[in-house]
């Protein structure tokens, strides 16, 4: 009996065919195997937009918790942790990009 790889939960995100929490981080690849020129910038822009949306959701739930309108505290805690992890991820990507840029600039001509 064989099972398709796509049917195993979590495998799609590990090999780059999907993403975490609905984030599609796969880039369009041209025929030579190189990533398109503006693919990285579009991925970054999408990541920043999704980060802002995640933080806005967390802030909205925090306001509901402060006013007593929040029915389930777990929703706020989950949203807060998602926003925190997303922020750490974006900062890590930014730090890696800056580090790569600095290394390129140090290369002799």
Image (spheres, rainbow, N blue to C red):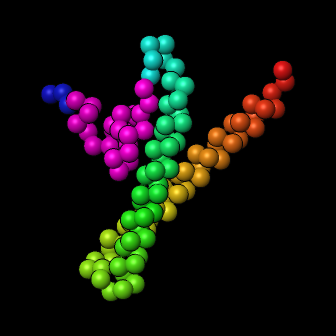
Q: Number of marks in the image?
A: 0
Q: Which residue is drawn at 22% across and 29% down?
A: 4
Q: Nearer the viewer, residue 21 or 4?
A: 21
Q: Quadrant of residue 53?
A: bottom left
Position above or below: 105 against 92: above
Q: Which residue is drawn at 74% across and 30% down?
A: 104
Where does the image place residue 1, in percent across and percent down from the top left?
A: 15, 28
Left or right of 78? Residue 107 is: right
- Is residue 21 shown in magenta? yes
Where does the image place residue 91, in percent across and percent down from the top left?
A: 59, 52
Q: Start and end of the magenta stretch? A: 4-28
Q: Which of 14 and 92 is in front in this view?
A: 92
The C terminus appears in which quarter of the rendering? Answer: top right
- Is residue 86 shown in magenta? no
Q: In which quarter of the image is residue 6?
A: top left
What secondary structure characterizes most of the magenta part? Answer: loop
């Amino acid at each position: 009996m064989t099972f398709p790889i796509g049917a195993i939960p979590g495998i799609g995100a590990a090999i780059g065919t999907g993403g975490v929490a609905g984030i599609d981080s796969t880039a369009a690849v041209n025929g030579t195997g190189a990533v398109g020129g503006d693919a990285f910038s579009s991925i970054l822009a999408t990541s920043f937009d999704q980060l802002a949306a995640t933080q806005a959701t967390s802030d909205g739930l925090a306001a509901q918790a402060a006013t007593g309108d929040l029915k389930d505290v777990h929703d706020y805690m989950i949203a807060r942790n998602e926003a925190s992890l997303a922020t750490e991820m974006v900062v890590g990507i930014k730090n890696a990009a800056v580090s790569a840029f600095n290394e390129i600039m140090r290369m002799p001509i």
